[in-house]
Each structure stands twice: as structure tokens, then as C-alpha cells.
Image (spheres, grey):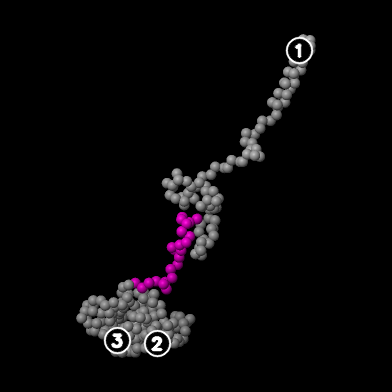
């Protein structure tokens, strides 16, 4: 081949290579974050509860400040979103601090006063007594809600009682004019004026508010009587009567007779 032919071939090769290079250079550059089909996408970084976060104060703090995964112990919820009923009729705004919290009743649940235990000081007991009243006298200490049955020799049986509400307390000396077991109850007109919803008459029995026994005081409407509401002992609750637990009024009833002196202070 002649030198001229070789020169022409070399020129054409250079031109073709130059054209190809120019075409490659003109193509757009690939995006830097291309993910190929066979290559799994890298997961977004998440923070989980780990040993090095133990100084934060436990899972509750981690819930507040961490981004726990959806399948984790605490799932992050929108603020103030109500959670499912926890089994005690209440809905919580945040997950429980520990797994057992949802198994405990709320501490601020309303307390049922009918289940209130009797203060031990209102239990029947033999106590020292320094008053001047003779044996067999009943002394009603209204302010402290105690009834004393004087025994003599410096002793008295003491019972817890319920007394009149403010405006219904009284004081004086009376005698027991009558005694009745499981007394019937007829509310007086004054009481019916205040409480027209009350029954006009109720036969004696466990549901009767006079309880198991009643001791009538003189010619008044006041009585020392039992109660079907023992949780009211130690409170100001009545319309002037002195109420006792049924077991206590039965005990007192058997120890005193008609004519016994009653001092109310």
C-alpha cells in the first residue's frame, strides 16, 4: 500500500474516533443516586432503643424522644390521639410506662363510700371514763361522735355514732321512753317537707333506715337507732337522731331499759 493510502486511512480513523468521542461526551451524565433493580434500596436511618440509651430513663423517655420503628415496643402516635380502651373504661393519651400499668385500675377512680372501712376508733370498746354520771347512764358526745354507756368504777363502753348534720344537732337530758325491735318508720311532716320523695311509711326490716333497734328519747322525735348505712358512722349525717351500727345498737339495746338517763352534749 502506498504511503498516500496509509495517510488517508489514518485520517479517516481519527475522524471516526473523534466523532464517537464527541457523541459520548454529549450524552447526559447518570444521576448519582441510581438504584438498580437487583440492588435493594438502603433503608432510611432509624433510631432504636439500645443499651447505649439506657441513661435516658427507660422506654417511656425513649418513646418521647426516639423514633421507634412501627413494630417496636412503643409505636409513635400523633399527639393527643386516643388509644384503645385499657379495660377500665378509660382511654389513655400515651402508652403505658411499663407492660403492667394497663393491668392496674386508675388511681383517680371515684371511690365508693359504701365500701369505706370503719375507722377502728369507732369500734365498740371498753375505755377509761372520768365523768360524774352514774352507771347505766348513756352519754352522747356529739362533737367527737361517741356514745358512752357508763359502767362505773371509772369505765365505760364506747360506741361510734353518726350525729346530726349542721343545724340539726342538739343537747339536753332525756330518758328512754320506749324500745322497739326492727321498728317501722313514719317520716314526720317536717322531714317530708324537706324530702317529699321519702315514703310515707316503711315497715321494719333490713332496708329500714332505723335499722335493727330503736330507743325513743322522751316525747321527742329523736331516737338512738341502728342504720343500714354503716359507712356513715363517724359523720354528721342525720336530722338529729343518734345512729349506730346494727350490731352496736343491738348490744346497747340489751344493756339498757326504759327509763335510762341519756345526756346529750
- Mark pair 2, 1: CA separation: 140 Å
Which residue is under mark 1?
A: 7
Q: In this view, does 67 lie above or below 138?
A: above
Label 1 secondary element: helix
Which residue is under mark 3?
A: 256
Q: Residue at x 35, y 74 (%)?
A: 234
Residue 167: give x, y in percent of width and height.
37, 77
Q: Earlier in the sequence, mark 3 or mark 1?
A: 1
Number of residues whose C-alpha sits closer than 10 Å to that of mark 3, classed few (under 14), some (14–19) or many (20 or more):
some
Dominant SS of magenta comes to loop
Number of residues whose C-alpha sits closer than 10 Å to that of mark 1, classed few (under 14), some (14–19) or many (20 or more):
few
Q: Earlier in the sequence, mark 2 or mark 3?
A: 2
Q: Which residue is drawn at 57% across and 42% down?
A: 44
- In magenta, the rendered stretch is 94-119
Q: In this view, does 247 lie above or below 16?
A: below
Residue 225 highlighted magenta (yes or no)? no
Residue 158: give x, y in percent of width and height.
29, 78
Which residue is under mark 2?
A: 183
- Mark pair 2, 3: CA separation: 17 Å
Q: Earlier in the sequence, mark 2 or mark 1?
A: 1
Amino acid at each position: 500500500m502506498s504511503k498516500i493510502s496509509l495517510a488517508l486511512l489514518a485520517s479517516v480513523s481519527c475522524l471516526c474516533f473523534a466523532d464517537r468521542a464527541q457523541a459520548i461526551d454529549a450524552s447526559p451524565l447518570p444521576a448519582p443516586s441510581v438504584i438498580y433493580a437487583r440492588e435493594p434500596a438502603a433503608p432510611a436511618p432509624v433510631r432504636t432503643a439500645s443499651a447505649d440509651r439506657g441513661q435516658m430513663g427507660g422506654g417511656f423517655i425513649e418513646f418521647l424522644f426516639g423514633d421507634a420503628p412501627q413494630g417496636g415496643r412503643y409505636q409513635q402516635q400523633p399527639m393527643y390521639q386516643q388509644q384503645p380502651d385499657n379495660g377500665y373504661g378509660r382511654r389513655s393519651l400515651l402508652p403505658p410506662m411499663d407492660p403492667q400499668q394497663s393491668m392496674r385500675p386508675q388511681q383517680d377512680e371515684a371511690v365508693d363510700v359504701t365500701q369505706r372501712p370503719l375507722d377502728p376508733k369507732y369500734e365498740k370498746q371498753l375505755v377509761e371514763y372520768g365523768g360524774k354520771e352514774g352507771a347505766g347512764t348513756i352519754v352522747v358526745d356529739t362533737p367527737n361522735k361517741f356514745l358512752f354507756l357508763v359502767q362505773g368504777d371509772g369505765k365505760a363502753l364506747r360506741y361510734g355514732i353518726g350525729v346530726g348534720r349542721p343545724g340539726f344537732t342538739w343537747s339536753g337530758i332525756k330518758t328512754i321512753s320506749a324500745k322497739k325491735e326492727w321498728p317501722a318508720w313514719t317520716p314526720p311532716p317536717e322531714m317530708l317537707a324537706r324530702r317529699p320523695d321519702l315514703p310515707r311509711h316503711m315497715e321494719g326490716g333490713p332496708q329500714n333506715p332505723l335499722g335493727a333497734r330503736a330507743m325513743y328519747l322522751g316525747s321527742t322525735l329523736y331516737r338512738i337507732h341502728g342504720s343500714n348505712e354503716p359507712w356513715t358512722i363517724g359523720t354528721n349525717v342525720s336530722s338529729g337522731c343518734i345512729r349506730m351500727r346494727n350490731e352496736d345498737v343491738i348490744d346497747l339495746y340489751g344493756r339498757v331499759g326504759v327509763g335510762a338517763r341519756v345526756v346529750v352534749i
